[in-house]
Image (cartoon, rainbow, N blue to C red):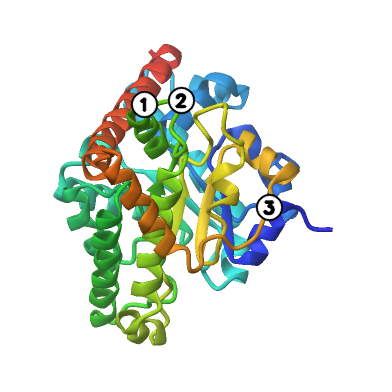
């Protein structure tokens, strides 16, 4: 009998673990077990995940001892790169078996370059070349400068995870940047079948902001994020199942899948698998931390709740606007705050490493 995580895979949704620790990667460890069970087919990481891992996992002690006296920032990158390479190698057989549709591992660029196009491109190219794994994805924030970096990295064959997306309008711009990157790659004679990208659309943070505007007694609590994501999915269906993408698909290109990020609920009053159940659907990714993964396996009820949901979602968003919810302003705030949080998390991880190598 299949569990909910396996049912999501059958539905056409990839499940990526939103976590990494060195001990997870050991033979017989947490990640190989998930992979063997067919419950996950990829992984995402970020600085806050690494900060927690380095603080909690004794498996880093040996390398930290070797890095004694190193610059803390350089040491952090050494730790992260080793984990990411090992994770890529773990998922590489799946990547090959699936014809480059599964088995991706994401690492984030230094968040300090989020507002610098040239730095994002240079760092992304260097990181992809150094780690030298075909199933590596480089995370680029979907900020205005990031939009300029996306097609340039894709044209060079770099897989891109576009992160920190909160608005439907920005999602659509990112999808167009992906198409532009594919066209540049094709024009240069590059292989489109081995190029992949996801668009990471953040969920729970939207509800946290909107619910604060609505107030505790509103009947529309916990509706904004799902409606917002479903509206983005409608844009995905229109763009990638229409004529704009057909020619690229014929040349071997994959769709740029929406990735539902921040899918652990922030409000304990809400069902703990709310964003798993309500955003289940084909050609998507849901990235979950351990707690959400366990809850989903245990009691999520899975069916396609995305296909054809865009019309009702837009009506929900209109009703929220009539109640004073300015989603455009909220999503702008969330993007700015998101970059700030990533920078803070990266610096906290550097400080953590400094305590070990300083």
| Residue indicated by mark 1 | 345
Q: How far separated are the C-alphas under marks 1 and 2? A: 8 Å
Q: Which residue is mark 2?
A: 51
At label 2, counting other C-alpha atoms closer than 10 Å, the crowd grade (few under 14, some 14-19, many 20 or more) is many
In front: label 2 or label 3: 3
Q: Position of residue 96 (x, y in %)?
A: 58, 69
Q: Decide if residue 87 is on the left or right side of residue 334.
A: right
60 left or right of 149? right
Q: Which residue is mark 3?
A: 5
Question: Could one spot residue 198 in this view of the protein?
Answer: no
Q: Looking at the picture, how far across and down is residue 7, in whole percent?
A: 70, 59
Residue pictured at 71% horizontal, 52% vertical: 4
Q: Vertical placement of 262 versus 191: above or below? A: above
- Residue under the point 24% across and 41% down: 326
Residue 116 percent location from the top left of the image: 15, 44
- For marks 2 and 3, the one nearer the N-term is 3
Could you tell me which residue is drawn at 53 percent across and 41 percent down? 18
Q: Residue drawn 45% across and 27% down?
A: 217
The answer to whether marks 1 and 2 mark residues whose Cβ atoms lie closer than 8 Å is yes
**C-alpha distance separating marks 1 and 3:** 29 Å
Q: Which quarter of the rendering shows the N terminus? A: bottom right
Along the line of sight, the residue nearer the viewer: 197 or 123: 197
User: Real-space Cα distance between discs 2 and 3?
Assistant: 27 Å
Q: In this rendered view, identify the residue nearer to me: 257 or 154.
A: 257
User: Under tag 2, what secondary structure?
Assistant: helix
């Amino acid at each position: 009998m299949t569990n909910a995580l396996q049912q999501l895979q059958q539905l056409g949704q990839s499940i990526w673990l939103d976590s990494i620790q060195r001990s997870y990667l050991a033979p017989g460890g947490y990640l190989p077990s998930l992979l063997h069970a067919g419950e996950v087919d990829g992984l995402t990481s970020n600085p806050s995940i690494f900060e927690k891992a380095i603080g909690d996992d004794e498996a880093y002690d040996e390398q930290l001892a070797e890095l004694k006296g190193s610059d803390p920032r350089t040491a952090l990158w050494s730790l992260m790169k080793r984990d990411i390479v090992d994770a890529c190698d773990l998922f590489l057989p799946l990547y090959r078996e699936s014809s480059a549709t599964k088995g991706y591992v994401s690492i984030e660029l230094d968040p300090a370059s989020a507002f610098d196009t040239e730095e994002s491109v240079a760092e992304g190219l260097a990181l992809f070349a150094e780690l030298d794994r075909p199933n590596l994805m480089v995370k680029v924030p979907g900020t205005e400068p990031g939009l300029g970096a996306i097609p340039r990295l894709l044209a060079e064959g770099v897989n891109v995870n576009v992160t920190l997306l909160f608005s439907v309008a920005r999602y659509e711009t990112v999808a167009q940047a992906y198409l532009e990157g594919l066209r540049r790659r094709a024009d240069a004679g590059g292989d489109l079948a081995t190029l992949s990208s996801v668009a990471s659309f953040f969920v729970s943070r939207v509800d946290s902001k909107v619910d604060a505007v609505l107030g505790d007694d509103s009947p529309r609590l916990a509706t904004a994020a799902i409606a917002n994501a479903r509206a983005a999915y409608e844009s995905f269906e229109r763009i990638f199942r229409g004529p704009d993408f057909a020619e690229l698909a014929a040349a071997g290109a994959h769709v740029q899948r929406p990735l539902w990020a921040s899918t652990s609920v922030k409000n304990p009053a809400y069902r703990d698998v709310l964003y798993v159940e309500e955003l289940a659907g084909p050609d998507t990714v849901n990235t979950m931390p351990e707690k959400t993964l366990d809850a989903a396996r245990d009691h999520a009820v899975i069916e396609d709740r995305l296909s054809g949901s865009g019309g009702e979602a837009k009506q929900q968003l209109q009703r929220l606007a009539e109640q004073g919810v300015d989603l455009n302003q909220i999503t702008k705030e969330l993007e700015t705050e998101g970059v700030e949080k990533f920078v803070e998390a990266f610096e906290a991880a550097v400080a953590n490493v400094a305590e070990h190598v300083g």
